[in-house]
Amino acid sequence: MHPTFHYFAYGSNLLSARLMERTPSARVIGPAVLDRHELRWHMSAADGSGKCDVVPVDEAESQVLGVVYEVALSEKPHLDAAETLGVGYAEREATVQVEGRPLSIWLYYALEIDAGSVPYDWYKALVLGGAKEHALEPGYIRMLEAVAAKPDQDTQRSDRHFSLAKAHQTRAQTR
């Protein structure tokens, strides 16, 4: 057995197909809850948009929902590169709840923050697609749906990401 690590996805990597493009070994452990955190879309990305971030807060009722994946440690450099480790995001260990049990995980958190950042519509579609794929709570999905997004002027990038989100949606509807 190869060494693995547990990764908590809460943004576009919620969508299994998105994460598996980056780390083919990724295997879903299950939906998870990160307590005392809020989801924000304020990571200032090099592409001119906002990406998801988790921010610690004092409110006990604040939670970020996501998914824990088990990933081969040998693929972590690929994930680090995709997450712009050291530039856009840093990483830390945390504890989430999976089916009511604590689990130690690794997560990425934003280094470059711009409160005025707005995500691209394709990025929001990937996040929503992943939330629906893993049947996260309906109220949480409604909260994600309410996030403002903007069109990406790079139509090739936009088309590529929308096709990934739509391919999953089509597969989910045919099940």
Image: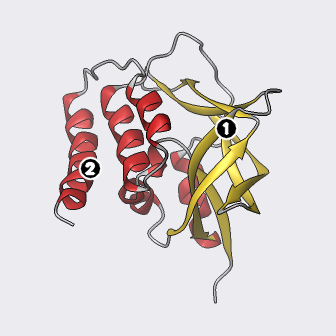
Percent from the top left, x then y, of residue 139? 48, 35
Q: Residue at x 26, y 55 (%)?
A: 168
Determine the CA span between mark 1 and mark 2.
Answer: 27 Å
| Residue closest to the far bottom | 1
Q: Residues within 10 Å of mark 1 (few under 14, many from 20)?
A: many
The numbered mark, 1 or 2, whose residue comes first in the sequence reads 1
Q: How is the image coloured?
A: secondary structure
Q: Quadrant of the N terminus?
A: bottom right
Instruction: Between residue 36 and residue 81, name the one nearer to us.
Output: 36
Q: Position of residue 172 (x, y in %)?
A: 25, 59
Identify the residue at image location x=80%, y=33%. Answer: 60
Q: For numbered disc 2, what is the local secondary structure?
A: helix
- Which SS class for mark 1? strand
Q: Percent x, y for residue 48?
A: 43, 20
- Foreground mark, 1 or 2, reads 1
Residue type at the position of mark 1: Gln
Residue 166 sits above or below residue 76 on the image: above
| Relative depth, front residue between 60 and 105 | 60
Q: How many marks?
A: 2
User: Which three-letter amino acid code belongs to the residue tagged 2?
Assistant: Leu
> Residue 63, labelled with which disc?
1
User: What mark, if any, has residue 164 been given in the picture?
Assistant: 2
| Relative height, residue 12 to residue 70 (above, below) | above
Q: Quadrant of residue 174?
A: bottom left
Against 145, residue 103 (above or below) is: below
Front-lying residue, 3 or 149? 149
Residue at (65, 49) in percent of width and height: 33
